[in-house]
Image (spheres, grey):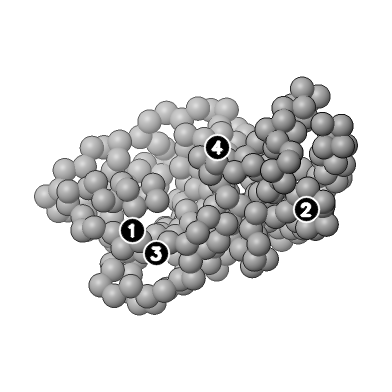
Amino acid sequence: EKFAAVISGAPHLDAPVVVAAEYGSAPDPEEVVGVDTAAYIHNETSTGVLASFDRFGDELMLVDGTSAAGVIPIDMSLPDVYYFSPQKALGSEGGLWIALMSARAIARIAEIAASKRWIPPFLSLETALGNSRKNQTYNTPALTTLYLLNRQISLLMSSGGLEAAHATSTRSSSYLYEWATDSAFASPFVTEARFRSPTVVTIDIDPAVSADDIAAVLRSNGVVDIEGYRKLGRNQLRVATFPNIPTSDIELLASCIDYVVTEL
């Protein structure tokens, strides 16, 4: 929605065609005739939805992989641009973007740069690409962000790489989905298993119990950051299951939630 809103506001671009689905689900990729660029989200951080994408022709394919990168396998022959910020599974901070680009995407950058369209240097992909080839950036990034990113990549690689990271997150998220399914007061928000994210688990709580109260009690006892996405407006908890979080911690969290609910 945010991507489409930005495109809609650009005077030099045609109105976007939006293929949507209800929260908690994802649209199946479908061909839209006459489109030269298709934009997808690999994994929806706010709702815990894992989406799919496909190519139907010569359109340029852009995929936002922020909460998938470093965990969820992807066929890199599909996207022309796979871009993300490293503040999720890559264990760093926001404010920095990373992109893997195909030769077609690089050619499109050159084509647009050669046109008459004015682009401020801060938003110029040509500027970013030119600097990256020299191991530089247009603006100085926070060194802590790069340090944490480097350490996390080294940790993931030494722990078995993408396959091991995916296995850890899948094991942790599967535990939570099964726990919520069997619970008397909780249920998975994403009902179809094929759409369930391995890195972000969203759990609906029975209206008789306040999810905010559960999160507040746990926070006061040092168990933090399981609040739901506010704009969704549901009585919900949202739990990260990135590979740095041991499955044993996820199991303890479920036990803590059970205990808090019995005491509320």
Q: What residue is pinned by disc 1?
A: 106
Q: What residue is pinned by disc 4?
A: 230
Q: Nearer the viewer, mark 3 or mark 1?
A: 3
Binning the other alpha carbons within 10 Å of mark 2 as few (below 14), some (14 to 19) or many (20 upward) gives many
Q: Position of residue 81 (x, y in %)?
A: 42, 58
Kind of residue at badge 2:
Ala
Whichever of callouts 3 and 4 sits on the residue coming sooner in the sequence is: 3
> CB atoms at circles 3 and 4 under 8 Å apart?
no
Kind of residue at badge 3:
Val
Please name the residue shown 57% across and 50% down the image: 47
Q: Secondary structure at mark 3?
A: loop
Q: Determine whether, in the image, residue 90 is placed left or right of residue 180.
A: left
Whichever of callouts 4 and 2 sits on the residue coming sooner in the sequence is: 2
Q: CA distance from mark 3 to mark 2?
A: 30 Å
Please name the residue shown 28% across and 67% down the image: 36
Q: Position of residue 68 (x, y in %)?
A: 59, 53
Q: What residue is pinned by disc 2?
A: 180
Q: Position of residue 98 (x, y in %)?
A: 47, 46
Please name the residue shown 49% across and 70% down the image: 28
Kind of residue at badge 1:
Ile
Q: CA distance from mark 4 to mark 2?
A: 20 Å
Q: What residue is pinned by disc 3?
A: 19
Whichever of callouts 3 and 2 sits on the residue coming sooner in the sequence is: 3
Kind of residue at badge 4:
Arg
Q: Determine whether, in the image, residue 208 is placed left or right of residue 192.
A: right
Q: CA distance from mark 1 to mark 4?
A: 37 Å
* Quadrant location, the C terminus: top right
> CB atoms at circles 1 and 4 under 8 Å apart?
no
Q: CA distance from mark 3 to mark 1?
A: 26 Å
Q: Secondary structure at mark 2?
A: helix
Q: Quadrant of residue 198?
A: bottom right
Whichever of callouts 3 and 1 sits on the residue coming sooner in the sequence is: 3
